[in-house]
Amino acid sequence: MDVNADATDGFDTSRLVDIGKSIYSLVIVLVLWELVGQLELIHYYFLPPLSDIILRFIELTLSGQMLENAFLTLYRALVGLAIASVFGVIVGVLSARNDFVDWFFDPIIKIGYPVPIISLIPVFMLWFGIGDISKIIMVAVGTFWPVAVNARDSTQQVQTNLLWAAQMMGTSDRRLLRRVVLPAALPGIITGFQIAMPLSLIITFVFEMVAGGGGLGALEIQGVRSFQSAQVYAAIIAVMFIGIGLDRGLRFIRSRLLHWT
Amino acid sequence: MGHATSQRIETLPAPLQGIVQTIFDWIPLGILVVLWEFASGTFVAESILPPPTIVLSRIVELIVTGDVFSHLFISLFRITVGLGLSILVGVLLGIGMARSKPVENFFDIFLSMTYPIPKTALVPLAILWLGVGTETAILIVFLACLLPVVLNAYNAANDVNQSLVWAAQMMGTSERAMLFKVVFPATIPEIMTGIRQAVPIAFVALVSAELIASNQGMGYLILTSGQIGNYPRMFANIVIISAVAFVAVRGFEEARNRVLVWT
């Protein structure tokens, strides 16, 4: 152990220097933010001092308000995404494997994918109201397209050699799908989830801002309307944590499922 | 199914083949439209799901009377400025980060921290700073489009073929000429890819900002049409903005293929 102490020490310092180099700018900006706020160079309403925002964040977390709204947002986004994933993968894989399904869905995907899905929020408010169900269906419809398109394209690109080899060895159609096609298409399918995940949050936030009913989007808008800017910033910090958490989570799942690539 | 019909189509005279194939390809959409027309007024109340014929006549009406254009032009102005700014700043930042270590050290942490934030969550913040209106919409479009442009420009500038750089250096190219004559042209295809990713994002960001924080523009028009119960007009405006988004993406792809003749 002692013999290696010097070597590890050296390693640690260079690592520390690297970390310092990469975060010094953030530290500068955060300190400036606090200073500007404390000296009231910018009006409190536009930019409250960082410490006030952190206090408000802790306050909202302790009172349970933050967790409750974060849970609502996550629940709507993830349930919608899960529904879209099931339908998207089924439609995508079938489109790639079956001419009739492809013929039917291809024009629908061509027209449906480019629609700015957010513009349908008023329609969903009309059809399904402003409750959880309406938001979940909206997320499911919006995230269906990237999941389906990525599943279809990656299934189409599965090497024919693999299929022929498996068929030659007498693999049944059903086993071919489970043991050859799906594993080979999995990286592309997960890429579809990675594209759809931020979209599910975008749809949920905007829906909550327009229609209310709790959630982080509603918490932000409520902060704007009651002139509590610290609450808006605190909610955005929570949004950042959720975004980073989900992003990391999907990357982790990806590396676990695709450890063979 | 596809094979059988394409064989049958081949027996037709050449000019007809393309037309018949196109019609055949779009039949499923036709079926949906017919179902929609039929369902509206029978299974679903006509007020909740106006039939396509009424929506279509409303679109024609909006265009002929010119009612839609004031809002459409405002939306197009916002999206053009926001996207244009994000391309300008994004290309500079991306290439700067790739070519200079201090610039990369400074901005990297901000990019990796803001990357996972859905930019529409920043609409309330934009309202705090800029109020309700055009500036807020432009800011949101700008922020939403910035990252795809930066990331693609950065990756491209990092991956510039080192032989090109060496060859230019050997011939005595100055640092500045290197940037404009070698690095920037080499990154153009990737930058185009970044913009291609940004265009649909721009439309989502635009409509979000206009739904929440605007009293003009297509998003506002859609929301208020719904609120006053003028559902045919709501659907008509959704179709119009979707068509504009579709044309924008397709138009950009066409333009990219024309510009990138050397790739």
Image: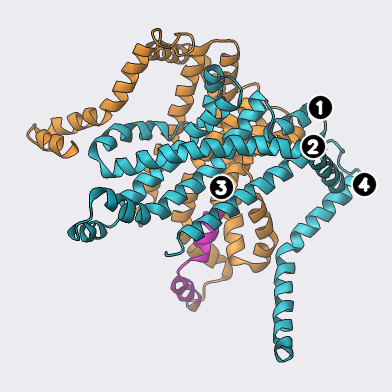
Chain colours: A cyan, B orange
The label number, if any, that marks residue A231 in the structure image: 2
Q: Where is residue B260 in the image (x, y as percent from the top left)?
A: 38, 52
Magenta span of residues: B150-169
Q: Mark 3 points at which residue?
A: B87
Q: Mark 4 points at which residue?
A: A39
Q: Which of marks 4 and 1 is nearer the N terminus?
A: 4
Chain to which mark 1 belongs: A
User: Which of A206 and A77 lies nearest the eye of the viewer?
Assistant: A77
Q: Distance between the residues labelled 2 and 3?
A: 32 Å
Q: Which residue is drawn at 29% across and 22% down?
A: B30
Nearer the observer: mark 2 or 4; the answer is 2
In the image, what residue type sits under mark 1? Ser
* Residues marked 1 and 3 touching at CB (< 8 Å): no
* Residues marked 4 and 1 touching at CB (< 8 Å): no
Q: Mark 1 points at which residue?
A: A226
Q: How far apart are marks 3 and 4 (CA)?
A: 35 Å
Chain to which mark 4 belongs: A
Whether discs 2 and 3 lie on one chain: the answer is no
